[in-house]
Image: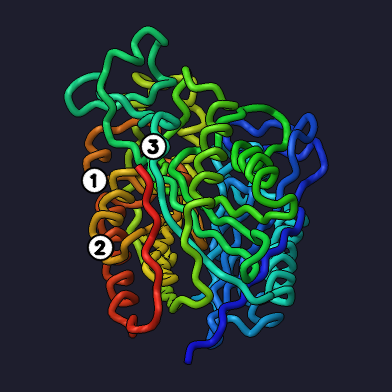
Amino acid sequence: MTAELRAGAARAEITPEPGIPLAGFWQPRPAKGIDTPLSSHALVVDDGDSSLVFVALDLIALLGSDVDVAKKGIRRETGIRSERIMVACSHTHEAPYPCPLLGKETHAEPDYIESVIHAIIESASSAHAGMVPAEVGFGSTRVPGLGENRRRLKDAGDAFNVWQLAPEERGRYPPAGPVDDELVMLAVRERLGEPLAVLWNYALHAHVFASDRISADFPYYVWQETAKALHPELTSLYMPGACGDINRPPETEPEAIVHRLSEAMIHLYGNLQFSSWLPMHSKLKSLKIKLRDFSTFQEEEIRRKQESSLEVCRQEWEVLRKAGAKSVGTALQAMAIGSLGFAGVPGEYFTALGLDVKQRSPFGTTAVVELANDYVGYIPTSEAFDQGGYELFNARSSKVARGTGELMADELVDMLSQLHRLDRTSPSIAPNRQS
């Protein structure tokens, strides 16, 4: 006889005071106010033997060293081991710096990072303490037209980002890669009762409501619209898909993105099958990845494509060159709830790589979660290294060696396969897919 599933959800605020520098642009921008709060959103699901913890942060990124401190705190409070905890950032560009990024004047505020770590621990431990008998359901649907591949092939094998092109040129050249319009959702409700939480995964840069004010961007507004329809106390966890090269198309209004995503989630929730127990597994793997050779500066390409960023890029290159690092340690993560798999990757993963993981995953539905547990910057395809473009300009946000993305994809598929081979004879539910 299987144990009954329990779950809990909670939120802790991480909104800073106005005036703090905001990340996500070439230069720091002092926050001129607050449009939305920033939060640590937590979900704990327990199958009677062990728990899985998901934490979604309204931040651009968070370093693995800080995530590790938070995970140790969660274990101290709950007993849950780090390999069963996934912490992912939404990548909102209207939040404070988690670490130095793009330029010598950028840095993290130690007191703020300490408050973020505390909020992660608080939200996860509160969710764990508040667990109730629960049911889970999951599924996916397509929501096309909300993202575009922001890289264009102006000439054969030469990629420009859309903002590096004149407006009249942007529709003239083909995209350098695909998009992923699958919305994956894990829903948790009280046993035959009220919705507790929705965890959703979609591949779109959280840079839709661009401003100089503190904001969680589109995930906040989707949460509010979904909560109006499902339950006012609903917890919403946005865990971004592989969207390192995906932005909002200029012709698509931000409000339309919010409306279509929330509408899709509400409709999907209403058609899910729920189960009171599903097998749950998790695996975390340490990985050492190679960094690029920083002996030469990309001056010709940067002048040709985005000369205004030349000085900042030179500063970044000097930091990397002087550091002299040849590799960096990080981690990959795989989780499973029934026939739903999660693949956690520690950076801004190109969409083609995320689609490759999904296609080769043995699970019926797979959510590739970028910015999970660490931040190593952009993780492009090997092909993109030949094409160039902003994501390949040497920087602390763009430093991994060619082949890293494919290596991570292979490792993630292997980890998912290992989880899939575990005892899966217990009751399960089929994913709900909608076209």
40 and 366: which is toward the camera:
366
Q: Image quadrant of residue 432?
A: bottom left
| Element type where label 1 sits in the image | helix
- Front of the two marks 3 and 1: 3
Q: CA distance from mark 1 to mark 2?
A: 14 Å
Q: Is the residue marked by circle 1 packed among few (<14), some (14-19), or many (20+) residues within 10 Å?
A: some
Please name whichever residue, 139 or 368, is drawn nearer the observer in this view of the structure: 139
Report the residue marked by disc 2: 410
Give residue 254's mark.
none
Task: Give the residue at the far front of this rendering.
Answer: 192
Amino acid, disc 3: Asp
Which residue, given by chain and number where applicable, does mark 3 sit on?
A: 245
Residue 316 as seen in the image, left or right of residue 151:
right
Quadrant placement of the C terminus: top left
* Residue under numbered circle 1: 382
- Earlier sequence position, callout 3 versus callout 1: 3
Q: Residue at x 34, y 37 (%)?
A: 179
Callout 1 amino acid: Ser
Q: Is residue 328 above or below residue 309?
A: below
Name the foreground residue: 421 vs 31.
Answer: 421
Q: Which one is earlier in the sequence, the residue at label 1 or at label 2?
A: 1
From the viewer's side, name the closer residue of 321 and 391: 391
Does the CB distance between marks 1 and 2 fall below 8 Å?
no
Q: Residue at x 54, y 63 (%)?
A: 64
Marks 3,1: beta carbons within 8 A? no
Give x and y (percent) for residue 301: 32, 26
Q: Which residue is at 68% across, 82% downward?
A: 76
How would you rate the neighbour count of disc 2 (Cα within 10 Å): few for under 14, some for 14-19, many for 20 or more?
Answer: some
Task: Find residue 325 and report its image quarter.
Answer: bottom left
Question: Is 324 left or right of 264, judged from the image as shown?
Answer: left
